[in-house]
Image (cartoon, rainbow, N blue to C red):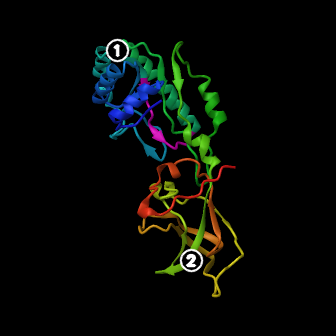
Amino acid sequence: LASGPAKTDADLAGLLELGVAQVNVESPHELRRLARLAEITRRPAPVALRVNRAEVSLGGSHRMAGEPTQFGMDPELVGDAVRLARSLPGIDLRGFHLHAASNNTDAAAHAAFVADGLRWSVEVARRHGVALRTVDVGGGIGVDYDGGTRFDLATFGAALRSVPVPDGVRLVFEPGRCLVAEAGWYAAEVVDVKRTHGRYFAVLRGGMHHFRLPSAWRMNHPFTVLPVDRWRYPWPRPEVSDATVDLTGELCTPRDVFARGVPVTRLRAGDVVVFALAGAYGWEISHHDFLRHPHPVHLVV
């Protein structure tokens, strides 16, 4: 599957050459560009129309639908987009893409969203004469980085079993975060510990050029302190005990922060801080070459 609001002609042509299973088309203009490339490459273009439905109320940390965003097309344009798809050579219209939110942890609400999306797709396909074969509800199955709530897959699965999926329709999920978040950790050495204007700061040998999720979401990412008793300098070791501290990165921007005002029992320069749940939206979305700082070492265990 291929999604995104700004696919280039090179992206679209490459997808066709690779024989992609489905291109989630964001607009009539993108649909026309894809048809043109399908004709040039002589490769059929399997398409789902991405729609920003107005009535979506799914929770989560980031909303892509149910309000004005750059994602998908207005539902009022669906009829025109269907007619356009039929008129364009090389376009195989299979259904709809309805991804609406990121990092939702309410399993019952997510199941209700899936059921509603299916009902909507069946009705719209019937109204516009679409031979419905695909309903892609996207991702959004979340991870609670604060540890208070866990997406209940058992509840989600039980609720889905009562959702009728029409014969011949493939229901597609994109569960990226929930599959890989727990499979990664990010570790960084504490370079310095200091106090400024009444706040303690631990400056790490790392930052949002390696692991951008905490700074992008302005959240306190969970971490563990691994004490390192070796100290290589002949002067007292900077440290903080039984206090709150901000964990920051090494970049020259105040946005490079992993956590703010978090309590620590003891944290010293030379210790290592390990951030769990770093397998999703970490290195992949980071500013890799910010001021030419080196990339992190990647270890596969």
Q: Which mark is residue 128?
A: 1
Q: Viewer-proximal residue, 107 or 301? A: 301
Three-letter amino acid code at the position of disc 1: His
Q: Is residue 100 magenta?
A: yes
SS state under label 1? helix
Which of marks 2 and 1 precedes in the sequence?
Answer: 1
Read off the residue under disc 2.
193
Q: Viewer-proximal residue, 230 or 169? A: 230
- Give the residues drawn in magenta, as a range: 96-106
Position of residue 265 measured from the top left corner of the image (x, y, whole percent): 67, 73
Q: Viewer-proximal residue, 192 or 132? A: 192
In the rendered image, is residue 51 in sight?
no
Three-letter amino acid code at the position of disc 2: Val
Q: Which mark is residue 40?
A: none
Left or right: residue 45 versus residue 300 is left
Q: Is residue 19 magenta?
A: no
